[in-house]
Image (spheres, rainbow, N blue to C red):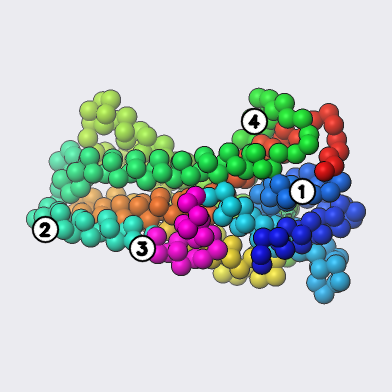
């Protein structure tokens, strides 16, 4: 659907919702709708990133197809979200990945193939398939400098694209409301994002994968988010151990980096598998087919990255450690290169949408017209 049609269609549906207001208790989207009389393109982009796709409004609505109003809020907001992802990403030819799954898959394969190819070319067989037990064992296979430089380049590239997109989100979704912001709004939006406060469909849980509400999607989503955070903590601790205390990996099983890494790895494997399983069984009516493809690429890459990380830990005292490590690094490269062009971006825009929502809710002026 071309961008202008998505915007116009979302606008049409939101105006009907604003007259109906049956779903106002379900989520922040409907409370944000209430303080608007009409919807600019920026409003639609903001609301689309505020929607958590819980589908409560779809199953509650008496105007869904075949009714002539043809209301399907989760689907149209998902379509609008994809538009925002592409619109705010960079460079343009890679941003098309949000609509063409082949580009994302191709990017992931190229990144992984480069890592595996270079490893096979540069690492001697005697080192790759040998048991390494001494401190610095991983660096006997892949030099520390190569890991750090490769990781930092990919990380800062993704960060730069996210920050550019975040800045565009903030400027393009600005409403006519005054925006004093404030510390309370920031804290409230952060706790909402980290605690997945609105992934509850108004109370009983997401209506996912079908019309029966349950908390299971929130649990899988929490495992995925907190698993990522736990692995980030593990990597930071390993950096501190190594560069401040001069203790080289591998670390004992009961050390902080390994505990955080293991908890995060298991959480990610369970969380991503659960979300994939839910998506496979999901009701197709309230979903956007383009969003589903992007979700699968992200979840599979993230899940495999966690799995190979765990396998590297399990096999670290065997001759298979080198192969597992290379596979893990290849998947990390695939994850980071696709991070600015896949589902990862929703973390950036949803957090900002929640911040805008919290700011809006603290405004003295309660209605916005354009
Ligand atoms: S989704 Fe349907 S029931 Fe809910 S507010 Fe909109 S029109 Fe009303
Ligand atoms: S799908 Fe859920 S989060 Fe999205 S608008 Fe409907 S009720 Fe709100």
Residue topped by disc 4:
186
Q: Is residue 288 left or right of residue 16?
A: left
Residue 260 position by quadrant? top left
Q: In this view, does 279 lie to the left or right of 300?
A: right
Dominant secondary structure of the residues highlighted in magenta in the image: helix
Residue topped by disc 2:
125
Tell me what residue is drawn at x 32 percent, y 29 percent: 240
Task: Using the numbered discs, state the Cα–Cα distance from disc 2 to disc 1 in whole angstroms.
Answer: 60 Å
Front residue of 108/31: it is: 108
Q: What x and y, as percent, mark residue 288? A: 64, 65
Nearer mark to the viewer, of 3 and 2: 3
* Magenta stretch in the rendered image: 90-107
Q: Is residue 100 magenta?
A: yes
Tell me what residue is drawn at x 80 percent, y 64 percent: 71
Task: Using the numbered discs, state the Cα–Cα distance from disc 2 to disc 4 in whole angstroms.
Answer: 52 Å
The numbered disc on residue 24 is none
């Amino acid at each position: 659907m071309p961008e202008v049609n998505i915007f116009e269609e979302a606008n049409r549906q939101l105006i009907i919702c604003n007259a109906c207001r049956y779903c106002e208790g379900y989520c922040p989207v409907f409370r944000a709708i209430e303080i608007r009389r009409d919807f600019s393109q920026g409003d639609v982009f903001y609301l689309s990133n505020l929607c958590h796709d819980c589908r409560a409004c779809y199953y509650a609505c008496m105007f869904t197809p075949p009714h002539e109003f043809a209301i399907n809020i989760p689907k149209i907001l998902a379509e609008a979200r994809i538009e925002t992802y592409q619109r705010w990403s960079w460079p343009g030819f890679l941003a098309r990945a949000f609509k063409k799954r082949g580009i994302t898959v191709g990017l992931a394969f190229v990144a992984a193939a480069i890592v595996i190819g270079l490893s096979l070319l540069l690492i001697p067989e005697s080192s790759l398939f040998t048991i390494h037990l001494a401190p610095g064992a991983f660096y006997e296979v892949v030099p520390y400098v190569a890991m750090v430089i490769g990781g930092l380049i990919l990380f800062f590239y993704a960060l730069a694209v996210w920050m550019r997109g975040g800045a565009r989100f903030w400027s393009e979704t600005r409403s006519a409301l005054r925006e004093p912001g404030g510390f309370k709004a920031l804290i409230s939006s952060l706790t909402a994002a980290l605690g997945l406060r609105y992934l509850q469909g108004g109370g009983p849980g997401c209506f996912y994968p079908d019309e029966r509400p349950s908390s299971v999607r929130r649990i899988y989503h929490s495992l995925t988010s907190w698993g990522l955070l736990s692995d980030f903590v593990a990597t930071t601790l390993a950096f501190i151990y190594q560069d401040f205390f001069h203790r080289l990996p591998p670390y004992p099983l009961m050390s902080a980096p390994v505990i955080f890494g293991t908890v995060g790895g298991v959480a990610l494997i369970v969380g991503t598998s659960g979300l994939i399983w839910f998506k496979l069984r999901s009701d197709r009516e309230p979903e956007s087919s383009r969003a589903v493809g992007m979700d699968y690429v992200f979840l599979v890459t993230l899940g495999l990255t966690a799995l190979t990380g765990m396998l590297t830990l399990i096999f670290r005292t065997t001759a298979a450690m080198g192969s597992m490590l290379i596979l893990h690094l290849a998947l990390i490269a695939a994850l980071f290169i696709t991070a600015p062009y896949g589902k990862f971006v929703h973390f950036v825009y949803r957090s900002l949408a929640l911040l805008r929502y919290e700011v809006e809710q603290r405004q003295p002026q309660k209605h916005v017209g354009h």
